[in-house]
Image (spheres, helix red, strand yellow):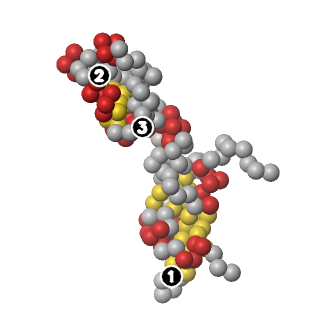
């Protein structure tokens, strides 16, 4: 019987990486390794294979299904607070302007402008669309009469991961679903 995985090129067979407690290392971006890295980790005994693709790889002496879900053997403690990056800022604010709600042409804005002593920190930078950023200019939200939907704050890694669940990637292999969305109600 033909299985869709058999037609897949090995390069389109990444492995979902779970921590030793069988939770994803990351939701957004999704923790994926190329098949070569996953196979190497299997042979180095650094991971446990949880699920496989139907697709196999072959060497002169071995045949092995390509791993689709792997779990690290040693637990990796996630950082409590993520790095302050543009992507993480957008993820914290759910990819929407904190002044108008738009999700287009996003940039970031200093709530207290730098010219007024504002710093580039989690607590003073928010996501803004280019038109709102231009409209606000070098003023505070109060001066510009532009209320912020949500005041900026320093998120935890857990909060960013939780936000990332709302933005699933374009492709999820069926073998990954049980490991990514364990909090959704199962069909009976």
**Residue that numbered label 1 is attached to:** 58
x then y, percent, for residue 136: 29, 22
Nearer to us: label 2 or label 1: 2
**Residue that numbered label 2 is attached to:** 136
The N terminus lies in which quarter of the figure?
A: bottom right
x then y, percent, for residue 170: 50, 55
In the displayed structure, does residue 118 sit left or right of residue 175?
left
The residue under the point 38% across, 39% down is 104
Mark 3 → mark 1, Cα distance in angstroms = 46 Å
Location of residue 63 with respect to 123 vertically, above or below: below
Q: Is residue 11 visible?
A: yes
The residue under the point 40% across, 17% down is 147
**Residue that numbered label 3 is attached to:** 103
Q: Residues within 10 Å of mark 1 (few under 14, many from 20)?
A: few
Q: Are marks 3 and 2 in contact (CB under 8 Å)?
A: no
SS under mark 1: strand
The residue under the point 65% across, 53% down is 178
Location of residue 11 with respect to 162 vertically, above or below: below
Give whichever of 86, 59 is nearer the camera.
86
């Amino acid at each position: 019987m033909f299985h869709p995985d058999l037609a897949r090129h090995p390069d389109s067979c990444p492995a979902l990486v779970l921590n030793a407690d069988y939770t994803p290392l990351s939701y957004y971006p999704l923790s994926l390794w190329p098949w070569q890295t996953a196979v190497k980790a299997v042979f180095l005994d650094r991971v446990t294979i949880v699920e496989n693709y139907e697709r196999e790889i072959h060497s002169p002496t071995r045949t092995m299904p390509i791993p689709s879900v792997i779990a690290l053997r040693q637990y990796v403690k996630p950082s409590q607070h993520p790095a302050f990056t543009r992507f993480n800022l957008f993820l914290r604010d759910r990819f929407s302007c904190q002044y108008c709600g738009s999700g287009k042409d996003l940039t970031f804005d200093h709530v207290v402008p730098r010219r007024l002593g504002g710093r580039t920190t989690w607590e003073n930078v928010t996501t803004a669309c280019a038109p709102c950023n231009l409209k606000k200019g070098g003023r505070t939200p109060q001066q510009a009469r532009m209320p912020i939907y949500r005041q900026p704050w320093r998120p935890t890694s857990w909060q960013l991961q939780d936000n990332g669940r709302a933005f699933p990637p374009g492709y999820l292999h069926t073998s990954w679903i049980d490991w990514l969305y364990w909090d959704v109600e199962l069909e009976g």
